[in-house]
Image (spheres, rainbow, N blue to C red):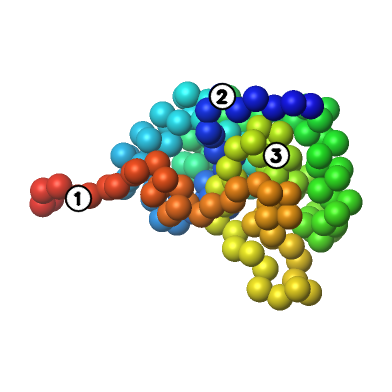
Amino acid sequence: MIQTRLQEGFCIDTCALIDLGRVHYPPDVFPGVWADIESLVSRGLLIAPKEVFDELKGVDDEILKWARRFKEMFKESDEDQLQEVADILARFPGLIDPTKTKPEADPFLIALAKSSGWTVVTSERPRTSPNARPKIPDVCKSYGIRCISLVEFFRERGWKYTRVGVP
């Protein structure tokens, strides 16, 4: 499959969305962050596999409500991506927890980024021990997929948020 990259986009992980909305930048406190995120989603430059949406369903909160409003960002895997998922899991079986009954998003996220040539945005950090389970950054590195943190994502987009005035 030949990929033509028209624009540079981003594939976002569940943990990055959770950190954005539940931990660091809740939408009611940081509406500017979410306006910028929504602009990327509406332009098709911020996507995730549908498995990310499925993982967000674990907690019925504002982030899940937001995800339902922007469901178009969550993509079904095509046949080529499913083949990539199989390859990723063959090479990195420890990427997923075999005791979980629902598919985990990580291999689908990596396959989506690989097939699109886009950058992965995640809050995961590389493993610190060679005996630890591989993490998204480890797998991305092995495939030559660019992988960045939320802060790196903000910096690359040139997003700066300052408080103006006093409440």
Q: Which mark is residue 163?
A: 1
Tell me the distance, in whole angstroms, between the alpha carbons under discs 2 and 3: 15 Å
Q: Residue 114 got which mark?
A: 3
Report x, y in % for residue 58: 64, 47
Query: In the displayed structure, does residue 149 sit left or right of residue 88?
Result: left
Picture quadrant of residue 34: top left
- Mark carried by residue 6: 2
What residue type is disc 2 on?
Answer: Leu
| Circle 3 Cα neighbour tier, 10 Å, few/some/many (<14 / 14–19 / ≥20) | many
Q: Is residue 57 visible?
A: no
Q: In what element is the residue under mark 1? A: loop
Give the residue at x 71% y 34%.
115
For label 2, count other residues whose C-alpha is less than 10 Å away and answer few (under 14), some (14-19) or many (20+). few
Task: Return the disc, 2 or 3, that comes first in the chain's sequence.
Answer: 2
Which circle's residue, 2 or 1, is located before the other in the chain?
2
Label 3 with label 1: CB-CB less than 8 Å: no
Residue 103: where, in percent of width, then height? Answer: 78, 45
How far, Cα to Cα, is label 2 from label 1? 35 Å
Q: Is residue 162 visible?
A: yes
Callouts 2 and 3 close, C-beta under 8 Å = no
Numbered disc 2: secondary structure: loop
What residue is drawn where x is 47% and y is 24%?
42
Q: Which mark is residue 79?
A: none
**x 78%, y 55%: residue:** 96
Residues 8 and 162: in front is 8
